[in-house]
Image (spheres, rainbow, N blue to C red):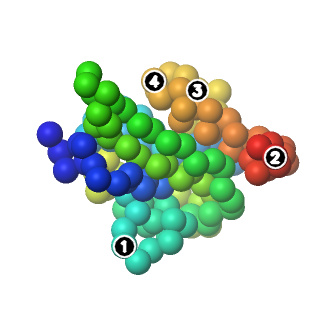
Amino acid sequence: MSERDYPGRPWVGVGVVVWREDRVLLIRRAKSPRKGQWSIPGGMQEIGETAKQAGIREVSEETGIDIVIDGLIDVVDLILSDEDERVRTHYTLIDYTGHCVQGDASPRPGGDVDAAKWVSHSALEEYGLWAETLRIIDKSRDLKHGGPSPVQQQT
């Protein structure tokens, strides 16, 4: 059992859908949760940093890529209960869209990931991504191509 099991409060995680032309930056997690699975870069917000700062830091730590945050995609609540209906895990996940800055854009895995790569949008299904991650990437792609903002969609 980890320190995040049966929490007294939600854990705040920040993820970023990073674009380079039509490709998305993916990482493969080397630690739980979701060890061995592909996802977008991200991690836990630290005391004293904004959510955007957390996203920029996590992408840099996990891939060596410097990014610019372009906007908010969505906020997702991940709440899992045990067989006694007690909340076992509770994450509030803040997802941003962004792009890599000029310069070296070759990902170098670091931190708690063991692989990082650019993947074309058309090849994403090959990586076994969580359905919610695919939804977030698609929402990011819509924003990138001038679709309605998530706030406009919800009101």
Q: CA distance from mark 1 to mark 2?
A: 31 Å
Instruction: Say what amino acid the circle numbered 4 marks.
Output: Gly
Q: Is residue 81 above or below residue 143?
A: above
Instruction: Say what amino acid the circle numbered 1 marks.
Output: Ile
Mark 3 and mark 1 lie on one chain; the one further toward the N terminus is: 1
Quickly name the residue at label 3: 123
Mark 1 and mark 2 lie on one chain; the one further toward the N terminus is: 1
Residue at the bottom extreme, as displayed: 48
Q: CA distance from mark 4 to mark 1?
A: 32 Å
Mark 2 and mark 3 lie on one chain; the one further toward the N terminus is: 3
SS at badge 3: helix
Mark 3 and mark 4 lie on one chain; the one further toward the N terminus is: 3
Q: Residue at x 27, y 49 (%)?
A: 7
Quickly name the residue at label 2: 155
Mark 4 and mark 1 lie on one chain; the one further toward the N terminus is: 1
> Are the residues tagged 2 and 3 within 8 Å (C-beta)?
no
> Are the residues tagged 3 and 4 within 8 Å (C-beta)?
no
Quickly name the residue at label 4: 128
Q: Residue at x 48, y 55 (%)?
A: 14
The x, y position of residue 20, in whole percent, is 63, 51
Q: CA distance from mark 4 to mark 2?
A: 32 Å
Instruction: Say what amino acid the circle numbered 3 marks.
Output: Ala
- Closer to the camera in the image, 105 or 52: 52
Quickly name the residue at label 1: 47
Judge whether residue 64 can be spotted in this image.
no
Judge whether residue 9 can be spotted in this image.
yes
Residue at the left extreme, as displayed: 1
Of marks 1 and 2, the one in the foreground: 2
